[in-house]
Image: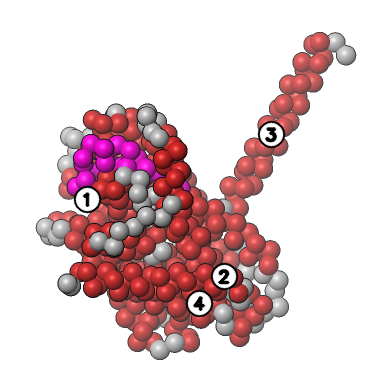
Amino acid sequence: MTKTQEKTFARKKSSHHLGFRLKRLGKFWHGLGPGLTTGAADDDPSGIATYSQTGSRYGFQMLWLAVFTFPFMAIIQEMCARIGLVTGRGLASNIRLHFPRWMLYVCAALLFVANTFNIGADLGAMAKATELLAPQLKYALLLIGFTAVILILEIFTSYRQYSKILKVLALVLLAYVITALTLKGVDWGDIARHAVSPSLKLTRDQILLVCGILGTTISPYLFFWQTSQEVEEEILDGKTTIKARSQENNWPEIKNMRRDVWIGMFFSNLVMFFIILTAGAVLHPAGITDIQTAAQAAEALSPLAGKYASLLFTLGVVGVGLLAIPVLAGSAAYVLSESFRWREGLYRKLKNAYAFYGVIIASIIIGLILNFAGFDPIKALIYAAIINGLIAPIIMVFILLVSNDKKRMGEYVNKPGINFLGWIVTIFMILVALASIYVIFN
């Protein structure tokens, strides 16, 4: 073989391997779905503010929380997804059928209030962050513009297209990883030590901060969204919506779902880790501890870490807001629609699910109005965190009971190890919620 032939053969071989790798990557990306978007939505602008505040106040001390919450978050979300796949019903529908309805109605009402506060704060953060990039744009116009874009996409875009948009928006969160990696003089050895060495002082501020972090990672709206999205994916694939007593083999689907969920939750906590790291490396040493919004964090980074880091951080706020607000509004719509047996589903058109889309519109519009009504967005987030902290453990008990019910789940009930970890995190969150209530009122 001549040298020319060898080079040609090498190029063809290299091209073949590249094509094979791209094909595998495409297949992997196609296999990701509700787990990825749910995990990404968890890092909404209010979550970014919480993580930034954690790093700015305590440096790297609380980095371990990102590692600690990952497996527990993934386990609970996996239960929710499995319930949706096996029963063909959303989480609220399962709760309605087998538990006192008044409990579901109370949880649904509280979730709607918490999500609406969160939406209002997120819209405000997106508008403020955009002002940093384009000061000539008016805050009010940005608020209305973002609201209109989100409503149009969620209501008038087909679910199949919309789910693809959400997946792409999830990639915006990589901006926070890149931001951290652009920082200079970071002590990675110190970071590694804090990541695996839990450190917590039982002060009022740290108790509330832990409650806030748990409320933004293991959050009720994610439970309902995950379950209902699994059902919608099944419907789009032409499968039956009620599978609880069927003889279908769900194990292949459950295997794919688990991969999706664990990757999504890992991605979520990875981003959380790097946001805390960035704030801890840049803002904490500079003595900047009063970070209350994601936009403030981006603004504070600019003179200290450079405009490039600030730009990435700001773009992340806007991108993830476009992802998280539809999830917040959608989860509230699923809960209320399933509670009152209204037609629901993003796969339906507006004319076939007026009540479902009505909840979405109401929650987003009310969130918009809160920004014009002089309502303090930070207080709104505190109220939302308290509500989430109160109802999350209750809903987690429902999730554990449903996912262990052999009558509904058959052979797909929880394994003993999963049960143990599920109850551990539920009890822990109950204790944190009680501790938070105590320090707030004392």
Task: Locate residue 400 relative to residue 393 in the image: left or right.
Answer: right
Tell me if residue 66 is in the magenta stretch: no
- Say which label, 4 or 3, has the lower sequence index: 3
Q: Which mark is residue 60?
A: none
- Compare residues 197 and 8 and report the one nearer the observer: 197
Tell me if residue 284 is in the magenta stretch: yes
| Mark 3, other Cα within 10 Å: few <14 / some 14–19 / many ≥20 | few
With respect to residue 236, does 199 lie above or below? above
Task: Locate residue 372 relative to residue 164 in the image: left or right.
Answer: left
Question: Which secondary structure lies at badge 1?
Answer: loop
Nearer mark to the viewer, of 3 and 2: 2
- The residue at which mark 3 appears reads as 19
Q: Identify residue type, mark 4.
A: Leu
- The residue at which mark 1 appears reads as 292
The range drawn in magenta is 270-299
Question: Which secondary structure lies at badge 2?
Answer: helix
Residue 157, x across and y down, in percent: 43, 55
| Mark 4, other Cα within 10 Å: few <14 / some 14–19 / many ≥20 | many
